[in-house]
Image: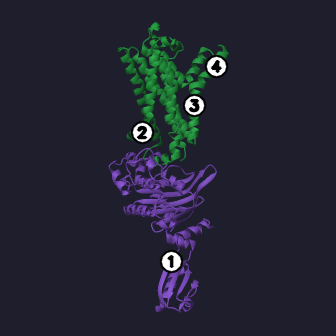
Chain colours: A purple, B green
Amino acid sequence: MSELNRGCNNAIALHAVCKQYGSETVVRDVNLNVQPGECLVLVGHNGAGKTTLMKLMLGLTRPSAGEVAVLGGNPALRSAVAQRKALGYLPESVAFYEAMSGREVLAFYARLKSVPVADCERLLQLVDLGAAAKRRVGTYSKGMRQRLGLAQAMLGEPQLLFLDEPTTGLDPSLRQHFYQLIDELHKQGVTSVISSHALNEVEARADRFAIMKSGDMLACGTLAELYAQAALPVRLRLSVTPGEASNVAGRLGPAVNISEVNNQSLSLSCFNAEKMPLIRRISDLGEVVHDMQIMPPRLDEVYNYYMNGATP
Amino acid sequence: MKLLWVLALKELRDGLRNRWIAAAILLLGALALSLSMLGSAPTGSLRASALDISVISLASLSVYLIPLIALMLSFDSMVGDFERGTMMLLLTYPVTRGQVMMGKLLGHVLILFIAILTGYGGALLIMIALGDGNTEGWQAYGVMMLSSLLLGAIFIALGYLISVLVRERATAAGAAIGLWLVFVILYDLVLFGALLLDEGQAIGQQLFTVLMLVSPTDTYRILNLSLFDGVSQAAGLAGVAAGAGMSSYLLVSLMLLWLVAPLSLALYAFQRREL
Protein backbone atom coordinates (compact mmCIF):
# COMPACT_ATOMS: atom_id res chain seq x y z
CA MET A 1 0.00 0.00 0.00
CA SER A 2 1.50 3.32 -0.99
CA GLU A 3 1.89 5.95 1.69
CA LEU A 4 0.09 8.60 -0.24
CA ASN A 5 -2.97 6.48 -0.96
CA ARG A 6 -3.85 5.76 2.61
CA GLY A 7 -6.77 8.12 2.43
CA CYS A 8 -7.09 11.83 2.11
CA ASN A 9 -8.67 12.68 5.47
CA ASN A 10 -5.40 12.33 7.30
CA ALA A 11 -4.96 13.69 10.79
CA ILE A 12 -1.38 14.46 9.84
CA ALA A 13 0.12 14.68 6.38
CA LEU A 14 3.77 15.44 5.66
CA HIS A 15 4.83 15.86 2.08
CA ALA A 16 8.52 16.01 1.12
CA VAL A 17 9.36 17.76 4.36
CA CYS A 18 12.92 18.96 4.95
CA LYS A 19 14.29 20.87 7.90
CA GLN A 20 17.67 22.51 8.06
CA TYR A 21 19.26 24.33 10.97
CA GLY A 22 22.02 26.34 9.37
CA SER A 23 23.91 23.92 7.15
CA GLU A 24 22.78 20.88 9.08
CA THR A 25 19.88 18.88 7.72
CA VAL A 26 17.94 17.30 10.55
CA VAL A 27 14.93 16.05 8.57
CA ARG A 28 15.31 15.02 4.95
CA ASP A 29 12.47 14.51 2.47
CA VAL A 30 9.98 12.90 4.82
CA ASN A 31 6.58 11.76 3.57
CA LEU A 32 4.16 10.59 6.18
CA ASN A 33 0.44 10.25 6.69
CA VAL A 34 -1.28 9.49 9.96
CA GLN A 35 -4.94 8.57 9.88
CA PRO A 36 -7.43 9.58 12.54
CA GLY A 37 -7.35 7.18 15.49
CA GLU A 38 -4.02 5.74 14.48
CA CYS A 39 -1.06 5.33 16.81
CA LEU A 40 2.24 5.99 15.10
CA VAL A 41 5.51 5.33 16.87
CA LEU A 42 8.67 7.09 15.78
CA VAL A 43 11.83 5.15 16.49
CA GLY A 44 15.42 6.08 15.82
CA HIS A 45 18.71 6.93 17.45
CA ASN A 46 19.28 10.14 19.40
CA GLY A 47 19.41 13.01 16.94
CA ALA A 48 17.61 11.06 14.23
CA GLY A 49 15.09 13.89 13.82
CA LYS A 50 12.17 12.52 15.82
CA THR A 51 11.75 15.57 18.03
CA THR A 52 12.18 17.93 15.09
CA LEU A 53 9.48 16.02 13.23
CA MET A 54 7.16 16.52 16.19
CA LYS A 55 8.00 20.21 16.40
CA LEU A 56 7.15 20.51 12.72
CA MET A 57 3.80 18.83 13.30
CA LEU A 58 3.15 21.09 16.29
CA GLY A 59 3.95 24.19 14.28
CA LEU A 60 6.76 25.18 16.64
CA THR A 61 9.09 25.33 13.69
CA ARG A 62 8.55 25.64 9.95
CA PRO A 63 9.85 23.23 7.34
CA SER A 64 12.71 24.41 5.10
CA ALA A 65 10.94 22.65 2.25
CA GLY A 66 7.82 20.61 1.80
CA GLU A 67 4.40 20.81 3.42
CA VAL A 68 3.02 19.93 6.80
CA ALA A 69 -0.72 19.59 7.38
CA VAL A 70 -2.21 18.79 10.77
CA LEU A 71 -5.98 18.38 11.06
CA GLY A 72 -6.15 19.79 7.57
CA GLY A 73 -4.15 22.98 8.08
CA ASN A 74 -0.62 24.27 8.27
CA PRO A 75 0.18 24.15 12.01
CA ALA A 76 2.71 26.99 11.81
CA LEU A 77 0.16 29.52 10.61
CA ARG A 78 -1.63 31.97 12.85
CA SER A 79 -4.92 30.45 11.79
CA ALA A 80 -3.87 27.17 13.38
CA VAL A 81 -3.59 28.70 16.84
CA ALA A 82 -7.22 28.05 17.77
CA GLN A 83 -6.86 24.49 16.50
CA ARG A 84 -4.18 23.79 19.10
CA LYS A 85 -7.01 23.22 21.56
CA ALA A 86 -7.31 19.81 19.91
CA LEU A 87 -3.63 19.00 20.45
CA GLY A 88 -1.80 17.62 23.44
CA TYR A 89 1.97 17.56 23.69
CA LEU A 90 4.31 15.97 26.17
CA PRO A 91 7.82 17.19 25.39
CA GLU A 92 10.91 15.14 26.04
CA SER A 93 12.10 15.87 29.61
CA VAL A 94 9.19 18.21 30.22
CA ALA A 95 9.87 21.44 32.13
CA PHE A 96 7.40 23.38 34.23
CA TYR A 97 7.37 26.59 36.21
CA GLU A 98 9.23 25.34 39.27
CA ALA A 99 7.78 27.81 41.74
CA MET A 100 4.17 26.80 41.07
CA SER A 101 2.45 23.82 42.58
CA GLY A 102 1.32 20.92 40.42
CA ARG A 103 -2.28 22.05 40.75
CA GLU A 104 -1.42 25.63 39.79
CA VAL A 105 0.58 24.52 36.76
CA LEU A 106 -2.29 22.41 35.51
CA ALA A 107 -4.83 25.16 36.19
CA PHE A 108 -2.66 27.63 34.26
CA TYR A 109 -2.57 25.35 31.22
CA ALA A 110 -6.28 24.59 31.58
CA ARG A 111 -7.10 28.30 31.41
CA LEU A 112 -4.96 28.69 28.30
CA LYS A 113 -6.91 25.88 26.67
CA SER A 114 -10.24 27.25 27.96
CA VAL A 115 -10.83 24.00 29.82
CA PRO A 116 -12.78 24.22 33.10
CA VAL A 117 -10.25 24.34 35.92
CA ALA A 118 -12.43 21.85 37.80
CA ASP A 119 -11.31 19.23 35.26
CA CYS A 120 -7.79 19.44 36.63
CA GLU A 121 -8.63 17.49 39.78
CA ARG A 122 -9.83 14.52 37.75
CA LEU A 123 -6.64 14.54 35.69
CA LEU A 124 -4.45 14.87 38.77
CA GLN A 125 -6.17 11.84 40.25
CA LEU A 126 -5.81 9.99 36.96
CA VAL A 127 -2.03 10.37 36.98
CA ASP A 128 -1.80 9.72 40.74
CA LEU A 129 -0.70 13.21 41.62
CA GLY A 130 -3.67 14.06 43.85
CA ALA A 131 -1.60 13.88 47.03
CA ALA A 132 1.30 15.90 45.60
CA ALA A 133 -0.85 18.53 43.88
CA LYS A 134 -0.13 21.13 46.55
CA ARG A 135 3.63 20.73 46.37
CA ARG A 136 5.91 22.94 44.31
CA VAL A 137 6.82 21.36 40.98
CA GLY A 138 10.45 22.13 41.84
CA THR A 139 10.30 19.35 44.44
CA TYR A 140 8.86 16.78 42.01
CA SER A 141 10.78 13.71 40.92
CA LYS A 142 11.34 12.94 37.26
CA GLY A 143 8.44 10.49 37.26
CA MET A 144 6.07 12.98 38.85
CA ARG A 145 7.00 15.63 36.30
CA GLN A 146 6.40 13.15 33.55
CA ARG A 147 2.97 12.34 34.94
CA LEU A 148 2.13 16.02 35.32
CA GLY A 149 3.27 16.38 31.73
CA LEU A 150 0.86 13.69 30.65
CA ALA A 151 -1.95 15.34 32.63
CA GLN A 152 -1.41 18.64 30.83
CA ALA A 153 -1.25 16.86 27.48
CA MET A 154 -4.64 15.30 28.22
CA LEU A 155 -6.31 18.61 29.09
CA GLY A 156 -9.44 19.26 27.07
CA GLU A 157 -9.65 15.77 25.58
CA PRO A 158 -7.34 16.33 22.61
CA GLN A 159 -7.88 14.57 19.28
CA LEU A 160 -4.17 14.43 18.64
CA LEU A 161 -1.46 13.52 21.12
CA PHE A 162 2.26 14.03 20.63
CA LEU A 163 4.33 12.19 23.20
CA ASP A 164 8.09 12.57 23.00
CA GLU A 165 9.79 9.72 24.83
CA PRO A 166 7.00 9.57 27.37
CA THR A 167 8.30 6.76 29.57
CA THR A 168 11.91 7.81 30.14
CA GLY A 169 12.52 8.09 33.86
CA LEU A 170 9.43 6.11 34.84
CA ASP A 171 9.77 2.93 36.88
CA PRO A 172 8.24 -0.28 35.48
CA SER A 173 4.94 -0.03 37.33
CA LEU A 174 4.52 3.60 36.34
CA ARG A 175 5.27 2.64 32.75
CA GLN A 176 2.49 0.12 32.84
CA HIS A 177 0.12 2.63 34.35
CA PHE A 178 1.20 5.10 31.70
CA TYR A 179 0.46 2.69 28.85
CA GLN A 180 -2.89 1.88 30.39
CA LEU A 181 -3.75 5.57 30.19
CA ILE A 182 -2.61 5.70 26.58
CA ASP A 183 -4.66 2.61 25.74
CA GLU A 184 -7.71 4.24 27.29
CA LEU A 185 -7.19 7.29 25.11
CA HIS A 186 -6.83 5.14 22.01
CA LYS A 187 -10.10 3.45 22.73
CA GLN A 188 -11.65 6.89 22.68
CA GLY A 189 -10.28 7.39 19.19
CA VAL A 190 -7.35 9.68 19.95
CA THR A 191 -4.69 9.87 17.25
CA SER A 192 -1.20 9.74 18.65
CA VAL A 193 2.39 10.14 17.60
CA ILE A 194 4.84 8.71 20.11
CA SER A 195 8.59 8.72 19.93
CA SER A 196 10.32 6.06 21.93
CA HIS A 197 13.53 4.14 22.50
CA ALA A 198 11.72 1.45 24.46
CA LEU A 199 11.08 -0.77 21.44
CA ASN A 200 9.76 -3.75 23.34
CA GLU A 201 7.25 -1.53 25.16
CA VAL A 202 5.76 0.08 22.10
CA GLU A 203 5.90 -2.98 19.86
CA ALA A 204 2.46 -4.22 20.82
CA ARG A 205 0.84 -0.81 21.11
CA ALA A 206 1.46 0.95 17.84
CA ASP A 207 -0.48 0.60 14.63
CA ARG A 208 2.48 1.70 12.60
CA PHE A 209 6.15 2.45 13.07
CA ALA A 210 8.36 4.99 11.38
CA ILE A 211 12.08 4.37 11.56
CA MET A 212 14.28 7.45 11.46
CA LYS A 213 18.00 7.58 10.92
CA SER A 214 20.05 10.78 10.60
CA GLY A 215 17.07 12.75 9.34
CA ASP A 216 15.83 10.15 6.87
CA MET A 217 12.69 8.15 7.31
CA LEU A 218 14.01 4.72 6.35
CA ALA A 219 10.76 2.86 6.64
CA CYS A 220 7.20 3.33 7.75
CA GLY A 221 4.51 0.74 8.10
CA THR A 222 2.85 -1.88 10.25
CA LEU A 223 5.10 -4.38 11.93
CA ALA A 224 4.20 -6.99 9.30
CA GLU A 225 4.98 -4.59 6.47
CA LEU A 226 8.32 -3.76 8.02
CA TYR A 227 9.24 -7.44 8.44
CA ALA A 228 8.40 -8.10 4.83
CA GLN A 229 10.32 -5.03 3.69
CA ALA A 230 13.34 -5.95 5.77
CA ALA A 231 13.02 -9.60 4.68
CA LEU A 232 13.81 -10.78 8.16
CA PRO A 233 13.29 -14.49 8.81
CA VAL A 234 10.61 -15.93 11.04
CA ARG A 235 11.96 -18.39 13.59
CA LEU A 236 10.24 -21.59 14.62
CA ARG A 237 10.99 -24.05 17.36
CA LEU A 238 9.64 -27.58 17.21
CA SER A 239 9.39 -30.15 19.98
CA VAL A 240 9.40 -33.68 18.57
CA THR A 241 9.32 -37.25 19.85
CA PRO A 242 12.76 -38.05 21.36
CA GLY A 243 15.13 -39.37 18.72
CA GLU A 244 13.04 -38.14 15.80
CA ALA A 245 14.61 -34.70 15.44
CA SER A 246 17.02 -35.42 12.61
CA ASN A 247 14.35 -37.42 10.81
CA VAL A 248 11.98 -34.44 11.00
CA ALA A 249 14.74 -32.10 9.88
CA GLY A 250 15.16 -34.13 6.72
CA ARG A 251 11.49 -33.91 5.84
CA LEU A 252 10.99 -30.15 6.15
CA GLY A 253 11.78 -29.45 2.53
CA PRO A 254 13.54 -26.56 0.80
CA ALA A 255 13.82 -22.90 1.81
CA VAL A 256 14.19 -23.75 5.46
CA ASN A 257 17.25 -22.88 7.46
CA ILE A 258 17.79 -25.33 10.30
CA SER A 259 19.99 -23.79 12.93
CA GLU A 260 19.92 -26.33 15.73
CA VAL A 261 18.94 -30.00 16.06
CA ASN A 262 18.79 -31.63 19.46
CA ASN A 263 17.49 -35.05 20.37
CA GLN A 264 13.93 -33.79 20.72
CA SER A 265 13.84 -30.22 19.41
CA LEU A 266 14.71 -28.20 16.33
CA SER A 267 15.23 -24.49 15.73
CA LEU A 268 14.47 -23.29 12.24
CA SER A 269 13.97 -20.09 10.37
CA CYS A 270 12.43 -19.14 7.05
CA PHE A 271 11.27 -16.05 5.21
CA ASN A 272 7.76 -14.91 5.83
CA ALA A 273 6.56 -16.00 2.39
CA GLU A 274 7.68 -19.56 3.13
CA LYS A 275 6.12 -19.67 6.54
CA MET A 276 2.66 -21.00 5.74
CA PRO A 277 3.84 -23.74 3.33
CA LEU A 278 6.34 -24.80 5.97
CA ILE A 279 3.71 -24.91 8.70
CA ARG A 280 1.48 -27.02 6.48
CA ARG A 281 4.33 -29.44 5.87
CA ILE A 282 5.03 -29.63 9.61
CA SER A 283 1.38 -30.32 10.26
CA ASP A 284 1.49 -33.13 7.70
CA LEU A 285 4.23 -34.79 9.74
CA GLY A 286 1.60 -35.88 12.21
CA GLU A 287 2.06 -36.81 15.87
CA VAL A 288 5.84 -36.74 15.72
CA VAL A 289 5.72 -32.99 16.26
CA HIS A 290 4.45 -32.28 19.77
CA ASP A 291 4.63 -28.56 19.88
CA MET A 292 5.54 -25.58 17.76
CA GLN A 293 6.52 -22.04 18.71
CA ILE A 294 6.53 -19.30 16.09
CA MET A 295 8.65 -16.27 16.81
CA PRO A 296 8.17 -13.41 14.35
CA PRO A 297 11.05 -10.96 14.12
CA ARG A 298 10.93 -8.42 16.90
CA LEU A 299 10.84 -4.68 16.42
CA ASP A 300 14.37 -4.35 17.72
CA GLU A 301 15.58 -6.72 15.00
CA VAL A 302 13.81 -4.65 12.38
CA TYR A 303 15.30 -1.56 13.98
CA ASN A 304 18.80 -3.02 13.96
CA TYR A 305 18.38 -4.06 10.37
CA TYR A 306 17.64 -0.48 9.35
CA MET A 307 20.20 1.12 11.63
CA ASN A 308 23.00 -1.10 10.35
CA GLY A 309 23.34 -0.13 6.78
CA ALA A 310 19.96 -0.23 5.11
CA THR A 311 19.59 2.79 2.86
CA PRO A 312 16.32 4.54 2.05
CA MET B 1 -7.95 39.27 26.06
CA LYS B 2 -8.78 36.59 28.59
CA LEU B 3 -5.63 34.73 27.62
CA LEU B 4 -3.59 37.89 28.13
CA TRP B 5 -4.83 38.04 31.71
CA VAL B 6 -4.07 34.39 32.31
CA LEU B 7 -0.50 34.99 31.17
CA ALA B 8 -0.19 38.31 33.01
CA LEU B 9 -1.52 36.91 36.27
CA LYS B 10 1.03 34.12 36.12
CA GLU B 11 3.84 36.70 35.92
CA LEU B 12 2.22 38.68 38.71
CA ARG B 13 1.98 35.63 40.90
CA ASP B 14 5.61 34.79 40.17
CA GLY B 15 6.48 38.33 41.22
CA LEU B 16 4.56 37.97 44.46
CA ARG B 17 5.99 34.56 45.19
CA ASN B 18 9.65 35.30 44.66
CA ARG B 19 9.25 38.48 46.76
CA TRP B 20 10.09 40.66 43.79
CA ILE B 21 7.15 42.94 44.41
CA ALA B 22 7.82 43.12 48.15
CA ALA B 23 11.47 43.98 47.56
CA ALA B 24 10.64 46.66 44.99
CA ILE B 25 7.96 48.23 47.21
CA LEU B 26 10.33 48.36 50.16
CA LEU B 27 13.15 49.79 48.07
CA LEU B 28 11.05 52.47 46.39
CA GLY B 29 9.13 53.35 49.57
CA ALA B 30 12.20 53.59 51.76
CA LEU B 31 14.04 55.73 49.23
CA ALA B 32 11.09 58.02 48.65
CA LEU B 33 10.64 58.54 52.37
CA SER B 34 14.28 59.04 53.25
CA LEU B 35 14.81 61.42 50.33
CA SER B 36 11.81 63.49 51.28
CA MET B 37 12.96 63.64 54.90
CA LEU B 38 16.47 64.64 53.94
CA GLY B 39 15.27 66.99 51.26
CA SER B 40 12.73 68.84 53.38
CA ALA B 41 15.36 71.03 55.05
CA PRO B 42 16.15 73.52 52.24
CA THR B 43 12.57 74.17 51.19
CA GLY B 44 12.13 77.33 53.23
CA SER B 45 14.11 79.92 51.30
CA LEU B 46 12.75 78.86 47.89
CA ARG B 47 9.23 78.53 49.21
CA ALA B 48 8.92 75.34 47.24
CA SER B 49 6.58 72.69 48.59
CA ALA B 50 8.05 69.60 50.16
CA LEU B 51 6.44 67.47 47.46
CA ASP B 52 8.07 69.48 44.66
CA ILE B 53 11.44 68.93 46.26
CA SER B 54 10.85 65.24 46.63
CA VAL B 55 9.79 65.02 42.97
CA ILE B 56 13.19 66.41 42.01
CA SER B 57 15.14 64.00 44.15
CA LEU B 58 12.91 61.05 43.36
CA ALA B 59 12.95 61.67 39.62
CA SER B 60 16.74 61.86 39.70
CA LEU B 61 16.88 58.61 41.61
CA SER B 62 14.18 56.81 39.62
CA VAL B 63 16.23 57.38 36.50
CA TYR B 64 18.72 54.89 37.93
CA LEU B 65 16.47 52.63 39.90
CA ILE B 66 13.40 52.07 37.73
CA PRO B 67 15.35 50.90 34.65
CA LEU B 68 17.33 48.58 36.87
CA ILE B 69 14.22 47.01 38.40
CA ALA B 70 12.55 46.79 35.00
CA LEU B 71 15.55 45.12 33.36
CA MET B 72 15.91 42.66 36.22
CA LEU B 73 12.26 41.72 35.78
CA SER B 74 12.49 41.25 32.06
CA PHE B 75 15.96 40.19 30.90
CA ASP B 76 15.34 36.54 31.78
CA SER B 77 11.73 36.38 30.81
CA MET B 78 12.09 35.10 27.23
CA VAL B 79 15.48 33.40 27.16
CA GLY B 80 14.78 31.76 30.52
CA ASP B 81 11.63 30.14 29.17
CA PHE B 82 13.48 29.08 26.02
CA GLU B 83 16.29 27.55 28.06
CA ARG B 84 14.06 25.73 30.53
CA GLY B 85 11.81 24.47 27.75
CA THR B 86 8.66 26.00 29.19
CA MET B 87 8.28 28.25 26.16
CA MET B 88 8.10 25.29 23.81
CA LEU B 89 5.23 23.75 25.74
CA LEU B 90 3.49 27.10 26.12
CA LEU B 91 3.53 27.69 22.36
CA THR B 92 1.76 24.40 21.69
CA TYR B 93 -1.23 25.90 23.51
CA PRO B 94 -3.80 28.05 21.73
CA VAL B 95 -1.87 31.29 22.29
CA THR B 96 -0.02 33.37 19.74
CA ARG B 97 3.53 34.52 20.31
CA GLY B 98 2.21 38.07 20.38
CA GLN B 99 -0.15 37.17 23.19
CA VAL B 100 2.67 35.51 25.10
CA MET B 101 4.82 38.62 24.95
CA MET B 102 2.01 41.07 25.62
CA GLY B 103 0.82 38.93 28.52
CA LYS B 104 4.29 39.04 30.02
CA LEU B 105 4.42 42.80 29.47
CA LEU B 106 1.07 43.27 31.14
CA GLY B 107 2.15 41.18 34.09
CA HIS B 108 5.50 42.90 34.50
CA VAL B 109 4.02 46.38 34.14
CA LEU B 110 1.44 45.39 36.73
CA ILE B 111 4.23 44.35 39.11
CA LEU B 112 5.95 47.68 38.55
CA PHE B 113 2.65 49.51 38.93
CA ILE B 114 2.02 47.88 42.30
CA ALA B 115 5.57 48.62 43.44
CA ILE B 116 5.46 52.27 42.36
CA LEU B 117 1.93 52.85 43.61
CA THR B 118 2.64 51.34 47.01
CA GLY B 119 6.24 52.51 47.38
CA TYR B 120 6.00 56.06 46.06
CA GLY B 121 2.29 56.42 46.81
CA GLY B 122 2.75 55.25 50.39
CA ALA B 123 5.58 57.70 50.84
CA LEU B 124 3.38 60.45 49.39
CA LEU B 125 0.66 59.78 51.95
CA ILE B 126 3.18 59.82 54.79
CA MET B 127 4.66 63.08 53.51
CA ILE B 128 1.25 64.68 53.29
CA ALA B 129 0.48 63.48 56.79
CA LEU B 130 3.76 64.84 58.14
CA GLY B 131 3.27 68.11 56.27
CA ASP B 132 0.03 68.71 58.16
CA GLY B 133 -2.11 67.74 55.21
CA ASN B 134 -0.40 70.09 52.73
CA THR B 135 -1.05 68.51 49.34
CA GLU B 136 0.50 71.26 47.22
CA GLY B 137 2.44 69.75 44.36
CA TRP B 138 0.65 66.41 44.28
CA GLN B 139 0.09 66.72 40.53
CA ALA B 140 3.82 66.83 39.89
CA TYR B 141 4.24 63.86 42.19
CA GLY B 142 1.49 61.99 40.33
CA VAL B 143 3.08 62.71 36.97
CA MET B 144 6.37 61.47 38.41
CA MET B 145 4.73 58.20 39.40
CA LEU B 146 3.04 57.73 36.02
CA SER B 147 6.13 58.62 34.03
CA SER B 148 8.17 56.28 36.24
CA LEU B 149 5.81 53.50 35.22
CA LEU B 150 6.25 54.46 31.57
CA LEU B 151 10.03 54.54 32.02
CA GLY B 152 9.80 51.10 33.61
CA ALA B 153 7.69 49.78 30.72
CA ILE B 154 10.29 51.08 28.27
CA PHE B 155 13.05 49.15 29.98
CA ILE B 156 10.88 46.06 30.30
CA ALA B 157 10.44 46.20 26.53
CA LEU B 158 14.19 46.70 26.06
CA GLY B 159 14.75 43.75 28.37
CA TYR B 160 12.47 41.57 26.20
CA LEU B 161 14.38 42.62 23.12
CA ILE B 162 17.62 41.48 24.73
CA SER B 163 15.96 38.35 26.06
CA VAL B 164 14.60 37.25 22.71
CA LEU B 165 17.81 37.96 20.78
CA VAL B 166 20.34 36.09 22.91
CA ARG B 167 20.86 32.34 23.26
CA GLU B 168 21.75 32.13 26.95
CA ARG B 169 20.53 33.69 30.15
CA ALA B 170 24.04 34.73 31.17
CA THR B 171 24.39 36.70 27.94
CA ALA B 172 21.05 38.36 28.60
CA ALA B 173 22.15 39.36 32.09
CA GLY B 174 25.35 40.88 30.74
CA ALA B 175 23.54 42.70 27.96
CA ALA B 176 20.97 44.06 30.42
CA ILE B 177 23.69 45.48 32.66
CA GLY B 178 25.39 46.95 29.60
CA LEU B 179 22.15 48.51 28.41
CA TRP B 180 21.53 50.01 31.84
CA LEU B 181 25.04 51.45 31.99
CA VAL B 182 24.70 52.99 28.53
CA PHE B 183 21.29 54.59 28.99
CA VAL B 184 21.58 55.58 32.62
CA ILE B 185 25.21 56.60 33.00
CA LEU B 186 27.42 56.47 29.92
CA TYR B 187 25.20 58.32 27.47
CA ASP B 188 24.87 61.38 29.69
CA LEU B 189 28.52 61.21 30.65
CA VAL B 190 29.62 61.20 27.02
CA LEU B 191 27.10 63.87 26.07
CA PHE B 192 28.17 66.27 28.77
CA GLY B 193 31.81 65.48 28.24
CA ALA B 194 31.44 66.31 24.56
CA LEU B 195 29.62 69.49 25.46
CA LEU B 196 32.44 70.59 27.75
CA LEU B 197 35.18 69.80 25.25
CA ASP B 198 33.25 71.36 22.42
CA GLU B 199 32.71 74.65 24.29
CA GLY B 200 29.62 75.43 22.27
CA GLN B 201 31.33 75.26 18.87
CA ALA B 202 29.67 72.41 17.02
CA ILE B 203 27.02 71.31 19.47
CA GLY B 204 24.47 74.11 19.49
CA GLN B 205 21.36 74.15 21.57
CA GLN B 206 19.36 72.51 18.80
CA LEU B 207 21.65 69.54 18.47
CA PHE B 208 22.02 69.25 22.22
CA THR B 209 18.25 69.12 22.63
CA VAL B 210 17.96 66.43 20.01
CA LEU B 211 20.75 64.45 21.61
CA MET B 212 19.05 64.68 25.00
CA LEU B 213 15.79 63.46 23.52
CA VAL B 214 17.46 60.42 22.02
CA SER B 215 17.79 58.90 25.48
CA PRO B 216 14.57 57.79 27.19
CA THR B 217 16.05 58.47 30.62
CA ASP B 218 16.82 62.09 29.73
CA THR B 219 13.36 62.49 28.30
CA TYR B 220 11.95 61.24 31.58
CA ARG B 221 14.15 63.63 33.55
CA ILE B 222 13.22 66.66 31.46
CA LEU B 223 9.54 65.77 31.67
CA ASN B 224 9.59 65.60 35.46
CA LEU B 225 11.84 68.55 36.13
CA SER B 226 10.19 70.98 33.75
CA LEU B 227 6.50 70.16 33.53
CA PHE B 228 5.43 71.95 36.71
CA ASP B 229 6.57 75.45 37.62
CA GLY B 230 7.10 74.65 41.27
CA VAL B 231 9.41 71.81 40.42
CA SER B 232 11.32 73.53 37.64
CA GLN B 233 11.96 76.61 39.76
CA ALA B 234 13.20 74.56 42.64
CA ALA B 235 15.36 72.53 40.28
CA GLY B 236 16.78 75.70 38.75
CA LEU B 237 15.47 74.69 35.35
CA ALA B 238 12.65 77.19 34.96
CA GLY B 239 11.54 77.41 31.36
CA VAL B 240 14.30 75.18 30.07
CA ALA B 241 12.05 72.69 28.39
CA ALA B 242 9.69 75.29 26.99
CA GLY B 243 12.62 77.33 25.71
CA ALA B 244 13.99 74.35 23.88
CA GLY B 245 10.62 73.71 22.26
CA MET B 246 9.88 70.57 24.20
CA SER B 247 6.24 70.28 25.04
CA SER B 248 5.13 67.64 27.47
CA TYR B 249 3.24 66.01 24.59
CA LEU B 250 6.44 65.68 22.64
CA LEU B 251 8.23 64.24 25.66
CA VAL B 252 5.50 61.71 26.38
CA SER B 253 5.26 60.77 22.69
CA LEU B 254 8.99 60.19 22.61
CA MET B 255 8.74 57.92 25.60
CA LEU B 256 5.86 56.03 24.01
CA LEU B 257 7.97 55.64 20.90
CA TRP B 258 10.70 54.19 23.12
CA LEU B 259 8.15 51.71 24.39
CA VAL B 260 6.64 50.72 21.06
CA ALA B 261 9.84 50.46 19.02
CA PRO B 262 11.75 47.93 21.15
CA LEU B 263 8.55 46.02 21.78
CA SER B 264 7.87 45.71 18.05
CA LEU B 265 11.43 44.63 17.40
CA ALA B 266 11.25 42.09 20.20
CA LEU B 267 7.98 40.76 18.84
CA TYR B 268 9.43 40.51 15.34
CA ALA B 269 12.47 38.63 16.63
CA PHE B 270 10.24 36.37 18.73
CA GLN B 271 8.05 35.52 15.71
CA ARG B 272 11.11 34.57 13.73
CA ARG B 273 12.86 32.62 16.45
CA GLU B 274 13.02 28.88 15.90
CA LEU B 275 12.25 26.62 18.79
Amino acid type assigned to the residue bearing label 4 in the image: Gly
Q: Which mark is residue B17?
A: 2
Q: Which mark is residue B179?
A: 3
**What secondary structure is found at the residue carrying circle 1?**
strand
Chain designation of label 3? B
* Callout 4 crowding tier (Cα within 10 Å): few <14, some 14–19, many ≥20: few
Q: Report, in whole angstroms, how far the alpha carbon at label 1 lies from the one at label 3.
A: 67 Å
Chain designation of label 4? B
Q: Report, in whole angstroms, how far the alpha carbon at label 4 lies from the one at label 2.
A: 44 Å
Comes first in the chain, label 4 or label 3: 3
Q: Report, in whole angstroms, how far the alpha carbon at label 4 lies from the one at label 1.
A: 86 Å
- Dividing the picture into quarters, in which one does residue A189 lie? bottom left
The residue positioned 42% from the left and 45% from the top of the image is A100
Residue A238 percent coordinates (x, y): 51, 85
Residue A82 percent coordinates (x, y): 41, 47
> Which residue position is annotated with label 1?
A295
Comes first in the chain, label 3 or label 2: 2
> Which residue position is annotated with label 4?
B193
Amino acid type assigned to the residue bearing label 2 in the image: Arg
Position of residue A105 in the picture relative to residue B216 (left or right): left
Q: Nearer the viewer, residue A119 or A193?
A: A119
Chain designation of label 2? B
Q: Report, in whole angstroms, how far the alpha carbon at label 4 lies from the one at label 3.
A: 20 Å
Amino acid type assigned to the residue bearing label 1 in the image: Met
From what the image shows, is residue B108 above or below residue B137?
Answer: below
Amino acid type assigned to the residue bearing label 3 in the image: Leu
Are callouts 4 and 1 both on one chain?
A: no
Comes first in the chain, label 4 or label 2: 2
Assign the C terminus of chain A to one quadrant of the image.
Answer: bottom right
Q: Nearer the viewer, residue A85 or A291?
A: A291
Are callouts 2 and 1 both on one chain?
A: no
From what the image shows, is residue A14 above or below residue B68?
Answer: below
